Image: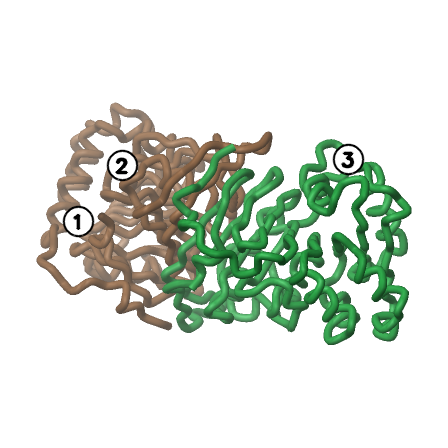
Chain colours: A green, B brown
Amino acid sequence: MSSNVALMRTAKAANHPNRGYIIPIGGAEDRTENPVILRRFVELCGGSNARIAIIPTASSLTDTGDLYKSVFSSLGVDPCRISILAFATRDDCRKRRYLKVLDRADGVFITGGDQVRLVEMLSATQVAAKMLSRNANGMHIAGTSAGASAMSAQMIASGKTGITPRVGIVELAAGLGLVDKVVIDQHFSQRVRLGRLLMAVAALKTQAGIGLDENTAAIIAPNDTLEVVGSGTVTIIAPSNLRIGGAASADDVVNVTGIHMHILVAGDMYDLRSIT
Amino acid sequence: MSSNVALMRTAKAANHPNRGYIIPIGGAEDRTENPVILRRFVELCGGSNARIAIIPTASSLTDTGDLYKSVFSSLGVDPCRISILAFATRDDCRKRRYLKVLDRADGVFITGGDQVRLVEMLSATQVAAKMLSRNANGMHIAGTSAGASAMSAQMIASGKTGITPRVGIVELAAGLGLVDKVVIDQHFSQRVRLGRLLMAVAALKTQAGIGLDENTAAIIAPNDTLEVVGSGTVTIIAPSNLRIGGAASADDVVNVTGIHMHILVAGDMYDLRSIT
């Protein structure tokens, strides 16, 4: 365990003193042996008394919601307080029953799957608006894999593998906009996604990039400091000075200069307010 | 094609006005279709009149020297002026016949194979000393794959794949010391070697890292400016501000912060004198 106080600026007044935590997870989080990430989420939400809403919409599997319900139960949450919001159509996002669950939830957990499917179902619905407003007033939101990607305002919809930036390596699309100023990628080291994250940051200019390894989370506190939890790394690509040049050669490789990057491990902190 | 003048500092007096070019290549360079790298080396050495010495010692194959001899012949070099210095023992490195070839060569080409094998044969021999002194006086030296790695004073001897810095991901060993202040890695994107290069730069502190893709070369001029040639990228990891923390978790991932990195493509320039 190490701590990067050098990366932390002196504390200033929090921008969102009442906001809930935002917890993007890089996918494949440990759910049984040593579930440090999910346990942290459950504790933030109130432990055994937590009211947790699971959104399994990104997943095309029918049992994803039940799977996480049993995981959160095994972590001590009262099963009666766990709801599965299985939005199957955009009309579902207007159902009062679902909206009432979100009104009372202490935390929302967004599963993995396909972030495009998730956003197509939720974006510009009452559910998406309620998640934003409730988070601003203290409800915590965690999302894994596709659920982490979708948190960005401009999200990585899809892309190709590799450490080299290339023309066409990444597709961006509107996301849910739960986090400001950062574009999030997941399964980062395992699927070698540095090239596509660099291209996303280069395209979005003012945004930073966060690359989350599997079983690794960025716990973003209300004051926008980020803490790393889990077994892998969180790569931060700061946008300052990053420049993108033209493509060269038939391989469509692109030059990207002025990359400023931090690779963080469990216990490390990073102040997202340092992103200009 | 793009050019990064922003990365170039204003010209100062060259440190090594008479030095030959140094050309590390990331392996798998094109030898037939569009051999831009090898053609550039041949042109620097004098074209059809070039005297070229091939050192195939890194390779365990018996025909590596002959292969490059036929490549350089096909690029117009008089075959009678191409010598293969097949050092098979350290005693071979004292043979006057070989040393005389190096006295007259316009350029030396070091093949791929195993950089440890190469350095064990050549280091602290008259051959290694002569390569340094002749390069200081104008002889050009190119090396591909293992031949590029061996150019560093502290070279990457071996390592593991992945973008994540980890404990034990890289083994360093003494190299031939043809280049100052940089540690070189090859097959960089293709074999996903960012993690091991970051660990090498972190360990060597004052040195920069150069990661060369396949079919891509860094043409280092006598004034220590570097030009990228070939179809892939050259990744420069500047050492300034890079800090390494402790290892966290059972996965042995390590935090590395303050990484300053440039990914360059054909036509881009970088001033190695900017490395403090």
| Mark 3 surroundings within 10 Å by alpha-carbon count, few (fewer than 14), some (14 through 19), many (20 or more) | few
Q: Is residue A113 visible?
A: yes
Tell me the CA gap for discs 3 and 2: 47 Å
Q: Which mark is residue A138?
A: none
Residue occupying image coordinates x 68% and y 68%: A176
Quarter occupied by residue A100:
bottom right
Indicate the amino acid at tag 2.
Answer: Ala
Q: Which residue is mark 3?
A: A32
Please name the residue shown 42% across and 45% down the image. Answer: B257
Q: Is residue A40 left or right of residue A6?
A: right
| Secondary structure beneath label 2 | loop
The mark lying in front, picked from 3 and 2, is 3
Among the two numbered marks 1 and 2 on one chain, the one whose residue lies closer to the N terminus? 1
> Badge 1: how crowded within 10 Å, few (<14), some, or many (20+)?
many
Q: Position of residue A219 (x, y in %)?
A: 60, 48
| Quadrant of the snapshot with the N terminus of chain B | bottom left
Query: Label 3 marks which chain's residue?
Result: A
Query: How many callouts does the rendering have?
Result: 3
Q: Position of residue B128 (x, y in %)?
A: 22, 34
Q: Is residue B97 above or below residue A110?
A: above
User: Pointer 1: what residue?
Assistant: B139
> Which chain letter matches label 2?
B
Query: Which residue is rendered at x = 53% and y = 43% of the image?
Result: B162
**Is B86 situated left or right of B26 in this image?**
left
Residue B153's tag is 2
Q: Are marks 1 and 2 on the same chain?
A: yes
Q: CA distance from mark 3 to mark 1?
A: 62 Å
Q: Circle 1 marks a residue in which chain?
A: B
